[in-house]
Amino acid sequence: MSDPTISSGVVIHGGVGTLPPDRMTPELEAAYREALRESLLAGSAALQNGGSALDAAVESVKVMEDSPLFNAGRGSNFDERGVITMDASVMDGATLRAGAVAGVVETRYPVELARTVMERTEHLMLIGEGADALARVEGLQLAEPAFFHTDRRWADLQRAKEQVGARPNVLGGDPSEKSGTVGAVARDRNGHLAAATSTGGMANKTWGRVGDSPIIAAGTYAGPHCAVSCTGWGEYFIRNAVAYDVHARMEYLGVSLEEATRGVIHGKLERQVPGAGGMVAIDSEGAIALCFNTPGMYRGWIAEEGEPSVAIFGEG
Ligand code: ASP
């Protein structure tokens, strides 16, 4: 069944790193569903208050960054040293302006910092200490590294180390152990599109590793045809310029959003690596897509004046 069309609204993902059914208790599932709903409501509230698509995407992502359940902001994965480094990006489809940060350690909302890079500097991407320094200069909220730590992600790091030994960036058989990311795409009343993505990256990542989430055209893209936010095994998303590929298929082949997203996730990517990941997308008419080739993806959508719809497992 195709995904619905909404005039203005928000579509979100909380990553393809869904917990396997044996670790997903009814309480945890309810907590995930509630967090997804809160994120959607924050995005639609931004739209109702006259906010732009970018405002909505950023507000939705901030809620998931604040939730310890998702691998972004608080609750992010640890790298091989046991340190949390976070990446994020935003893109405004109306202007093609974009901002990104990688390897930040003390910015409470990395997605807000990505937006600040876009709006307050002449650059597109800042990394590491320089990025955190901009957060300080611009008065963004900071947090101690301990704020981002959760016992669950610490346990995931230990499991990832046992599973993959010396090969830190290999996605094992169970993606829930290593991956996750949050993202949102939105369309506002003016028909403008925007995308935002934020992540702690993959558990046990090599010190300094950056995935697709802060890379414009790989993990995030927004243009006149559609806005896309991805989740999954970042190296493959970078090589395949996944988010931009969806936009390019619509622009150059004239295909629908559904055909473009399925062609990338279930065609190109799945041929290279089964279980590579997924994405959410919205097009200029408000058609939406929530597409993945993994056992599940935390996800949901809301029309500006509507009720949130959320899902975790099932067909993507
Ligand atoms: N794409 C993210 C990364 O590679 C991880 C994920 O979405 O699961 O850093």
Image (tube, helix red, strand yellow):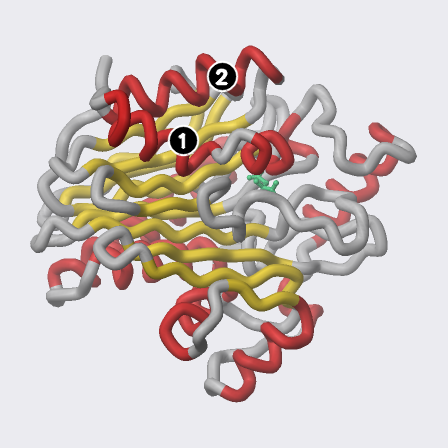
Rendered image: mark on residue 268 = 2
The kind of residue on which mark 1 rests is Asp
Foreground pick, 191 / 164 = 191
Residue located 18% across and 31% down the image = 287
Question: Which comes before the other along the chain, label 2 or label 1?
Answer: 1
Q: Circle 1 sits on which residue? A: 245
Residue located 55% across and 85% down the image = 136
Spot occupied by residue 182 in the image (x, y as percentages of width and height): 47, 47
Tell me how far mark 2 sits from mark 1, CA to CA: 10 Å
The N terminus sits in image quarter: top left
Residue 150 falls in image quadrant: bottom right
Residue 107 falls in image quadrant: bottom right
Tell me the SS state at disc 1: helix
Please say if 53 is above or below 158: below
Foreground pick, 118 / 53 = 118
Spot occupied by residue 20 in the image (x, y as percentages of width and height): 60, 25
Spot occupied by residue 93 in the image (x, y as percentages of width and height): 27, 51
The answer to whether mark 2 and mark 1 are in CB contact below 8 A is: yes
